[in-house]
Amino acid sequence: QVQLVESGGGLVQARGSLRVSCAASGRTFSNYAMAWFRQAPGKEREFVGGISRSGNLKYYSDSVKGRFTISRDNAKNTVDLQMNSLKPEDTAVYYCAADSNGYGSNKSPANYDYWGQGTQVTVSS
């Protein structure tokens, strides 16, 4: 079992920056690829970015590529998402997720074994 707890969400103006973090506990964190997803009201949960177990492979959705950066610290059991140049359409609940089999590139939520409770990010225009 892996427990994931997100933090760092909030309200930010368009073109601003925000960093959300996910703290993991339970089983060995470095055994899991990690990802961030988001879900806006009335929309499906969508992949934002993923990172491999060692952190050397990173994947992003086209909508955030060049603006968001995913990183992890296996010594601290954390995975972060740095979000720059935020847009109102980035408004959503952001979730971190752990995948015991993949490499961080899986875009389907069904591939992930554990989820956090989510943190709200709101970008005002």
Image (cartoon, grey):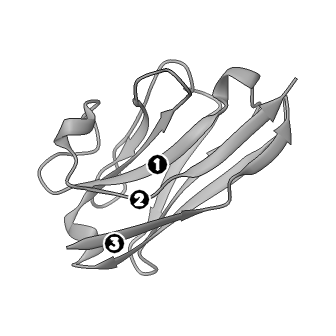
Residue 109 x %, y %: 27, 37
Say which element carries label 1.
strand
Q: Which mark is residue 116?
A: 2
Q: Quadrant of the N terminus?
A: bottom left
Q: Quadrant of residue 91?
A: top right
Do residues under tags 3 and 2 come within 8 Å of each other at their CB atoms? no
Q: Nearer the viewer, residue 49 or 121?
A: 121
Say which element carries label 3.
strand
Of the two numbered discs 1 and 3 on the same chain, state the one appearing first in sequence: 3
Q: Nearer the viewer, residue 74 or 113?
A: 113
Height in image: 112 above or below 105?
below
Cα–Cα span, label 3 and label 2: 7 Å
Of the two numbered discs 1 and 2 on the same chain, state the one appearing first in sequence: 1
Q: Three-letter amino acid code at disc 2?
A: Gly
Cα–Cα span, label 1 and label 2: 6 Å
Q: Three-letter amino acid code at disc 3?
A: Gln
Q: Quadrant of residue 3?
A: bottom left
Q: Which mark is residue 95?
A: 1
Residue corresponding to mark 3: 3
Do residues under tags 1 and 2 come within 8 Å of each other at their CB atoms? yes
Residue 80 x %, y %: 54, 57
Q: Residue sitting at 38 percent across and 43 percent down?
A: 50
Q: Three-letter amino acid code at disc 1?
A: Tyr
Height in image: 114 above or below 108?
below
